[in-house]
Image (tube, rainbow, N blue to C red):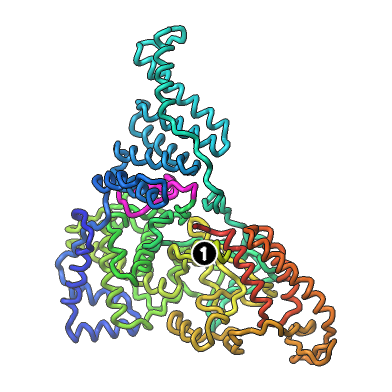
Amino acid sequence: MSSQSSNCSSYRNFESRVRGSSSSLEFRKKFDDSNRKNYRRAMIDHILTALGPAPIAVEMDFNGKDVELAERLMQQADELTREHDDKLTGAVAAALPDSELFFKCLMRRARQAYATGRFQSCARDCRLYLDRRASITRGDESDDAVDVLFLLSDACKGMRKDVEARNHVNEAMKLISRFAATSCGTDRADSQRFKEEKAALFKRFLSRRQKPAVASPARLKNSQEDKEVPAVLGKNHEYLSCASDAVDLVYDPSKGRCLYARRNIPAGSVVIVDRPFAWCTDTAALARNCLHCHASLRLDHSAPVPCRNCRSVLFCSENCRAVSWNKYHRFECRIFNYFHINKLQRTSSLLAYRTVITAALSGINGDDDLSSTRGINRDFLKLHEVEDATPIEAVAPDPEKYKPDDYKTVFALKTHGGDFTPEDDFERAAQSIFLAKCFIDALSLSAEETEKSSTDKDLLRTLAVAMLHSMHAINCNAYEIVENVRDESSKIFEPRNVGGAIYSTVSLTNHSCYPNIVRHSYPCGAVVVRSIRFIPQGAEVLDCYGQHFLESDRDTRRKFTAAKYHFDCQCDACVNDWPMQLPTDKFDFKCKKCFGKCRKTTRNYAECTSCGQKTDINKYYIMLQNSVKKRLSALTKMYDGNYSEALPLLLEHSNCIDKILSEPSLETVKTQQSIIQCLNALSSTSV
């Protein structure tokens, strides 16, 4: 790769070259035929053949460190506001790693955090400063280390960690003693000169300490420590390791793989806790979320840590930075701008690239030699070395072969290849070739050797096929990673997109416009799937890919699922054409015998429309009235921010109305929406 740039000219030149070499009618005919048959390898081959033997040039394209920018941002940050906090973070990110300017910017940000009462943020910056200094000074501490230790002590006091605060003061005093001994040539405690020098140094450092700050108002917390990922209901499934044993994987000839309830599942139960096979971050979230775990960087305790090579991405901790670099960021950092060329491709191209990286290097440690094709997982390459229009072996209906962490489960996801237009696939195929070349170069394979070696040409072709396959799969299988932001005026949590991910277990759930589960994002891309109403034994576990039946009419919903996911929705809401507007004062009770719908026939009785069973509804009315009071009480608690107290009340109410009310029911939907709001507060949140 050549020098850093910032306008993606390398890709645009490649794209222009591809279009220029593939404009003939003969090419279009061959490519369109391969597109229609979903022959990915053939589509890649057509473009590679048209390009000819000339090498594919890949230049570095990323936002590198910028000393002038760092100095300018630090000078501009002269107010105690969020905007100026962001400028200091920008300065820290732009400064060369472990340079004096970096430490100066970091210290400035720590002092600003302390001045505004954000003690946890201040402490994190102080610890990062000390750790980074220690790694390069090797015991040769400067005066700044004393200032940082005193500041860290004050921050700990602000957090009421008095023991830790005293320990940091003791560390600072040890350094002062060492400086005094060096200055006067002795460290004898009875030496008058030593005592005077130590006292003078102590006085000087005390004069530089900041005035005590007032703690900032308590805000929502969002860190890996605070947001514990819950366990699944019961035990983990025998082979679906991310799912509860309350569900089972079934193969249906018309639906494909799907999940069903093995036993009754109460509302609020955790049925799946899935980890992403690969994930990525949206462009808009790069400045406000950790690249690796997606923890919010906008909260009072946050102290963003920059990449040591670029200034485009931030992390919530040094640990996330190191893990990210070893797993994937080192293969994308120097080409990061390429993933932001086309607005429509920003998420899918990076997610496809990360999916290929994860699969290709599975089982390989960061210390292994990645300088040849032997560094890439051979099983992964074999999957894409043959035409994969129908990966029959991977999608065999034997559920006991299913392994959630195996790339074959991702490879087996429906791609609906052949349903994309030739124009779309041409663009994707060209991009796949370019990204495959980027990956090869990131693996330290010489561009010259790549073009001369037939083996490396095969590697380029196979990796490009894998990229194209991933782009197809992502189009209809990727899930959004979201964080929830509370609107203080409406007191409602609204979702905000952070990124996208591929989940091998969650993807087994089918769609319904009236789902019985809901997904919530947790740190490190984890997704927690809970039931939002009672799911009886034998019922299918159903997610919602599009709009709820109350949000749009049946035709609109079906058009969306047909265009995006290539199926005609046959859920209860669509088959029965449930109305978007449900009456507030009218509902039907549920038959005890067959669970059908009971219509009121007299003042005290209702008759089932299915089996004719008559039911005394007076008891139901009393149960409903008493139970609704729980929902209203829960709403008051939610308004005050006490979501953990509101949730049990809502689940009790849900248990009651699931037994007595027939669907659709506005009371049932309201309860489910309130349950979702409580779960929003328990998942990833931000401000």
> Is 679 situated above or below 203?
below
Q: Is residue 304 magenta?
A: yes
Return the x and y of residue 281 as percentages of the image width and height: 40, 61
Query: Which range is magenta?
Result: 300-323
Return the x and y of residue 477 as percentages of the image width and height: 45, 72
Q: Residue at x 24, y 62 (%)?
A: 456
Position of 462 with respect to 625 (left or right) is: left
Return the x and y of residue 271 as percentages of the image width and height: 62, 65
Q: Judge whether residue 556 can be spotted in this image.
A: yes
Q: Judge whether residue 393 can be spotted in this image.
A: no
For residue 571, what is the image quadrant?
Answer: bottom right
Return the x and y of residue 250 as percentages of the image width and height: 59, 75
Position of 436 with respect to 219 (left or right) is: left
The residue tagged with tag 1: helix, strand or loop?
loop
In the rendered view of the protein, which quadrant contains the N terminus? bottom left
The 10 Å Cα crowd at callout 1, few under 14, some 14 to 19, many 20 or more, is some
Q: Residue at x 36, y 54 (%)?
A: 313
Amino acid type indicated by mark 1: Lys
> Is 5 situated above or below 74?
below
Q: Is residue 634 magenta?
A: no
Position of 28 with respect to 529 (left or right) is: left
The residue to which callout 1 is attached is 403
The answer to which of 628 and 598 lies nearer the viewer is: 628
> Is 374 situated above or below 259?
above
Please count the marks in the image: 1
For residue 609, what is the image quadrant?
Answer: bottom right
Q: Residue at x 37, y 71 (%)?
A: 471
Question: Residue placed farthest to the left in the image?
Answer: 54
Q: Residue at x 23, y 63 (%)?
A: 8
The answer to which of 188 and 87 lies nearer the viewer is: 87
